[in-house]
Image: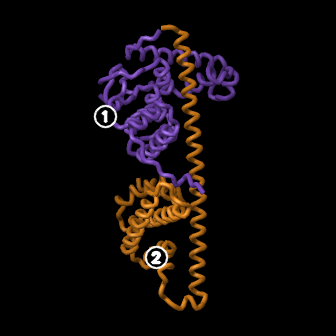
Amino acid sequence: MDDNRLNEAIQSALHKDRDNRIKIERWETGRKRKRRTFRRLATLTAAAALIAAIAATAAWFIPNSHNKHTDESPGQAAVYRGSDRAIPEIDRLIEDGNLSDALSQARRLESRYTSEIKLLSDIPSPTEEQSYEKAVAEEMAYNIGWRKIQLLLALDSTAVAKPLVREYCFKIGPHQSEAHELWRKLR
Amino acid sequence: MNLPIFTRTKPLDDIEAIKGIQMGDESTERRFYLSCQKYFLEKYDRVFEFSSSTRQPIDIFQDSFIILWTEIQSRHIFVKDGRVYRYRRNGGKSPMKASLKTYMMAIARYKNLELLRENEIFGHTGYSSEIADGATDEPELTLEGIALMEISSMPQHCREILTMFYIEGKSLDDILTLRPGNVSKDGLKSGKSKCMAQLKTRIIRQLERLNIKTT
């Protein structure tokens, strides 16, 4: 075969191969940037949740006329969805040694947040508020899911917990490294 | 405010991915890359019995993805009458039984074995894509496409040296500085010639197998 023709083809293919690799590098950079944004947002969300929890606790102890009545107005009820109490509630059950109850509670809440995430994900052009709500729901589902894993392990359901631990190894979040460590032990 | 991390796109099916890639649509390519990566990371520990200590799973993924991607770009994998077909190395064509991602996992598995073998026994075994499937039809395979396929499955050092020398126009001295693994200029020169000769042999062999005549 004509050697010049072959050389030309090789040159053009080497070019294409290099372009492909450059593209991959670019996509990887984009993906990493996205991860960083997500992490930053998750930190901000966690901080906001913490501030809200502190504010709610403080409001509970500061005596004022508004705290005297126990009825929540429908407006408050709509706003208050228990997101700031979900995890402490599970933690309280764990502290009391009610592991099965804590697990049921974790499962119930996780499923609630998962359906909420799904609903919000199905919105084609979410508003800023919807995006924020989704981020909060994802954060909650993530933290509750991690507690669920701990509870499953404590209740000797290792076979059920194992695939969940594996999932957490690939989920970006504060428990990722713990998940890796746990996975190594469980493997 | 636009929050890109919340955008949700529908999953790509194989036919859509192949058509997009063959049209050079970068957004499809990117989506395909990311979905393959997700799939790979979820499954690799079930596929790899032992993993190579010298390379990270993500590197094996990228090498495998590039092979799959170039097979699609070079139309070794193509769509005809709503079905996905693939050229076999022996020249036959057949409908693919496995999905693209499953096929990529098969490539990854092979790559991983290759790496393990490289660590235990010396020498490179060369990539063979006789992994996934069963014969029919006519896409336009080009000499460039075949060359691309062969380049993507060459040993990494060969690919790098050839790219630096022929595409980036670097001198042997520059390459020697950039690739500290090469001990001498003569060694590098002979390595480059061997890589080029090996690549040409592989392309010609593949043209013969596929019974492709070039002018």
Q: Position of residue A163 (x, y in %)?
A: 39, 55
Q: Position of residue B58 (x, y in %)?
A: 51, 41
**Which quadrant does the N terminus of chain B fall into?**
bottom right
Quadrant in which residue B71 is drawn = top left
> What amino acid is labelled 2 in the image?
Glu
- Helix or strand or loop: what does disc 2 sit on? helix
Looking at this view, is B166 or B73 the one in front?
A: B73
Relative to B131, does residue B8 appear above or below in the rendering?
Answer: below
Residue for badge 1: B97
Total numbered badges shown on the rendered structure? 2
Q: Residues within 10 Å of mark 1 (few under 14, many from 20)?
A: some
- Helix or strand or loop: what does disc 1 sit on? loop
Q: Position of residue A115 (x, y in %)?
A: 40, 63
B133 displayed left or right of B170: left
Residue B117 shows in the view: no
In percent of the image, x 57 and y 30: which residue is there?
Answer: A19
Distance from disc 1 to disc 2, alpha carbons, whole Å, reads 50 Å
Q: Are marks 1 and 2 in contact (CB under 8 Å)?
A: no
> What amino acid is labelled 1 in the image?
Lys
Q: Residues within 10 Å of mark 2 (few under 14, many from 20)?
A: some
Q: Chain of mark 2?
A: A
Image chain in orange: A
Residue for badge 2: A89
Relative to A13, does residue A108 appear above or below in the rendering?
Answer: below
Which label lies toward us, 1 or 2?
Answer: 1
Q: Chain of mark 1?
A: B
Quadrant in which residue B174 is drawn = top right
In percent of the image, x 41 and y 36: which residue is there?
Answer: B104
Image chain in purple: B
